[in-house]
Image: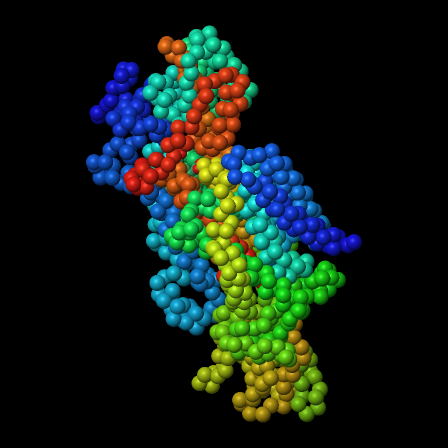
Amino acid sequence: MSLIGLSGTLLFIAFIAYLVATLFFGGAIKGTKQDASKSNKKWGKIAITITIIGFIANLGYFITRWIYAGHAPVSNMFEFTTAFGMFVVGAFILIYFIYRLPSLGLFALPIAILIIAYASMFPREVTPLIPALKSYWLYIHVITAAIGESILAISAVAGIIYLLKNIDTSKRTKSSIWLEVVMYAAVLVIGFVIVTSTFRIMGYEADFTYVDKNGAQQEITYNTPALFGMHQYELKSSGKMEPLAEMPAIVNAKKLTTVVWSVLVGTILYGLIRLILRKSISRFIQPLANRANLQLLDEIGYRSVLIGFPVFTLGALIFAMIWAQEAWSRFWGWDPKEVWALITWLFYAAFLHLRLSKGWQGEKSAWLAVIGFVIIMFNLVAVNLIIAGLHSYAG
Amino acid sequence: MKSITCECGHVNPEGTHLCEKCGRPLTDEDKKQKIVDMKYEGRAIRSKTYNKSIIDKIWNFFSSVKVGVSIIVITLIAAAIGTFLPQVIYVNVTEGEDIKQAYVDNYGTFGKIYYNLGLTDIYSSWWFQTLIGMLAISIIVASLDRGIPLYKSLKNQRVRRHESFMKRQRIFGEREMTSAEADKTLDLTEKKMKELKYNVRREDGVLLAEKGRFARSGPYVNHLGLIIFLFGVMLRLMPGFYVDEDLWIREGETASIPGMEGYYLHSNKFTFETYKKDEQKEEFNQSKAAVNSVAKNYQTDVVLYKAKDNAVAGDTTDLKQVLHHAIKVNEPLKYDGFALYQMDFRLNELKAMNFNLVNKKTGKSLGEVNINLADPKKVYNLDKQTKVELKGYYPTFSGFEDGEPQSESPVPNNPAFIFKMYTPETPKGETSFVAIKQTLEPLGETKYKMQFANIETRNVSGLTIRKDKTLPILALGGIIFMIGVVMGSYWSHRRLWLQKTVDGRLMMAAHTNKNWFSMKKDLDTVTEFAHLPNWVDQQDDDDLKKKQEKEKEGDNTL
Ligand code: HEM
């Protein structure tokens, strides 16, 4: 098998391992008693073992791809997002060995699975490096920042479990609705994965020409039926769907089309789930959180921010500045990606101060952790795809 | 200054909550509390004590964490708004084009409003800078306000604390014991806690085991780092600390380096390379992205020269070669505190044009004229009687105005010339206007013409010259910040107090500034080993009540 083929297989093994481990973590929280029973402990042990095996396979993917490509595999959307998913699992393993809370795995692994699934929707080719990306500092920066973000993400996982346990989902309150919005957002990601992979399997391709912002003629290929057309588009492939509406030149109608497809399919999927469950998703999965200890969850949330914050500072700000100084002649340039790293950092600084001196613990702290994760994902998804800057990898 | 005298006789300054010496709660409110507030060890905090003079008020404003967090959040939101549309520095406008118009053209009404609100250059706006300044002041004031009392009290800790202090700790336990039993427990505790890397201090019947005290200074160290960093950023505004210049240099040219006095740069060659097909991974070649070739390298090969010390400025006759370097993206040339970066380029700029002086009828050439477009000569002599005079040169010819040819810029994008041609046949000279794809003979038809032969081109490198003397200060600030944030985040300050009472009990109390579950693991270990009293977390049974209380009160601690 070629190295790149091996790499792909390892990633697949990791993916399956995470799925299986999630089921075992489910087994580890069965029962009603607060104290973990013997069988619970056994399930927990198996679950973390499988997780670690998956993580090793995942690392194997990372290393083999690195060797094959000749550069660290964090240089396009697929590579970076996959690495992020891997680090989330790594961060979970780290926190698990401090606190040994199985329900953390039950929620952290599905999030990592979603992230990796999302990543696989992007082109997986090994891209040659443009000159700006040829720097060791860049890789040190990207990898450290991603590790920091993934540790911070664990605080959001603890936060979600905390909220599920603490919020009365049978009542319609502001918090229960927002919690359901979080669940809905996760379903939208599944919607994106379904749409993209369906049309990919069908091999859908529609070529267009359009006129860009500067008045130049460009070509673009849609991989989903075009709902929106680019500025002054012209369909070149025969027998493909004509766009429903044309967008002005500053809007990337292809990306917009993908977003709208994902929201459509995700919403239908969400509706179906609601129909089958006959209750909200948060109410349905609430029992999974019931046995966790609130104070422990609160501490895990805080602790993971404490562990992640310095790593994030080092990676996303300090190493980033060193690289920017080497590559762009200035350590800071108010590029959107830089600004969003700063925003994330300021947000977690505010989180720490609010907790320390305003006593924002428990539910408030849990919400802040979830919002922090939203900011990180925004930085990863939206800033890369919508607000293009120096860092924007091809989307 | 008012002061509070504790029952133990110690005189505490106004605003103290827990006696500095024995730990007794001092105010009525503190006495009522089931768990004491251990923030800053109950020391008097300036901002919580005085609120009379205007200075007090300013001090209290900046030391408030509520204010500090508000500043952070406002900065964060402002920073986010600045990313809605590209900032002016990232908008390309050709010369003469209005930047505002560019926003209107690209983003419509929203762009116009965004521009008019000044959001297109938000990060250099006075109010954004003011926010950062206030952040700095807030950090300094808050750190002094709390850091000094905290430092004092941790340094002067007594081992023996009053019973009322012990009982009001979050973790507390007591049991009746004989004196001998208690002594044995103290011994065992000392042994175990030392194994767990605690510092143990003992006095008559009391014990204090402590670990990770330095973690408490973490926030103050990291704030110091931030302040040093912000100070470094401000220093750049001082002249001499910061140089930022651009240099366009052509192949073969030697230019003085702006901002870098006495230094000259010679460009040997500019190279732009793209990946060849066999350099790319196969699966990339099969993809659509591969249709456009991917940039591989931008590189300027340069030689750096230094003028002799006593040389007149601009005199390039006597230069000393310093070094050769290939400037690439990510590999700047660094010398003497300066760095030269590869930032931009122009390929194939016209360098020279060659013409033949041709007899129109016979088509015979009298010779070739080579015009260096950067530095054209006035007269080109072909032989004794044959010469071409350059009467006019228009590097970027843009048309005629009042019969006069015009040039838009000094860069030879579209050169045009007025030649006067002297030959043995036409000794008085003939005038001809020559531009690309256009020849005019304004003073009557000519016998000879300047026939275009070929062009020579060269590449131009866009370099940026930087000097930033503040970098060491920024690096220092960053390092101090990292040390502080790691100290405060990866360690916690844990303490265990034991006390033998006269009426035959052993009391234990414990405190940590964070991560109570991890602290309890230590306690579990030592409790089992040393037969300590069974302890409870007084916050656990109290949790619900406290939660309701807090919501009512709206938490006004800071
Ligand atoms: C972006 C700027 C800031 C950063 C990155 C920062 C960072 C930190 C960190 C990491 C901690 C420790 C938190 C913990 O251990 O949970 C801390 C504590 C603290 N910060 Fe800041 N800080 C910033 C701005 C401020 C400001 C503006 C104030 C002013 C009010 C402030 C006041 C404090 C105080 C009073 C503490 C608690 C110290 C203690 O526990 O003794 N900080 N800061």
- The number of discs equals 0
Q: Residue at x 49, y 42 (%)?
A: A290
**Considering depth in this image, is A188 or B71 the residue closer to the camera?**
A188
Q: Is residue A23 left or right of residue B92?
A: right
Residue closest to the far right: A1
Q: Is residue B64 left or right of residue B265?
A: left
Q: Residue at x 38, y 52 (%)?
A: A173
Q: Quadrant of the C terminus of chain A?
A: bottom right
Q: Is residue A159 visible?
A: no
**Considering depth in this image, is B252 or B221 the residue closer to the camera?**
B221
Residue B256 pos. (x, y %): 54, 57
Q: Is residue A146 visible?
A: yes
Residue B301 pos. (x, y %): 64, 57
Instruction: Name the colour scheme.
Output: rainbow
Residue closest to the far top: B180
Q: Quadrant of residue B159?
A: top left
Q: Is residue B488 above or below residue B295?
A: above
Residue A181 pos. (x, y %): 46, 56
Q: Is residue B417 left or right of residue B223?
A: right
Residue A322 pos. (x, y %): 54, 47
**Considering depth in this image, is B307 or B143 the residue closer to the camera?**
B143
Q: Residue at x 58, y 50 (%)?
A: A110
Ligand 1: image quarter: top left
Q: Quadrant of the N terminus of chain A?
A: bottom right
Q: Residue at x 45, y 18 (%)?
A: B533
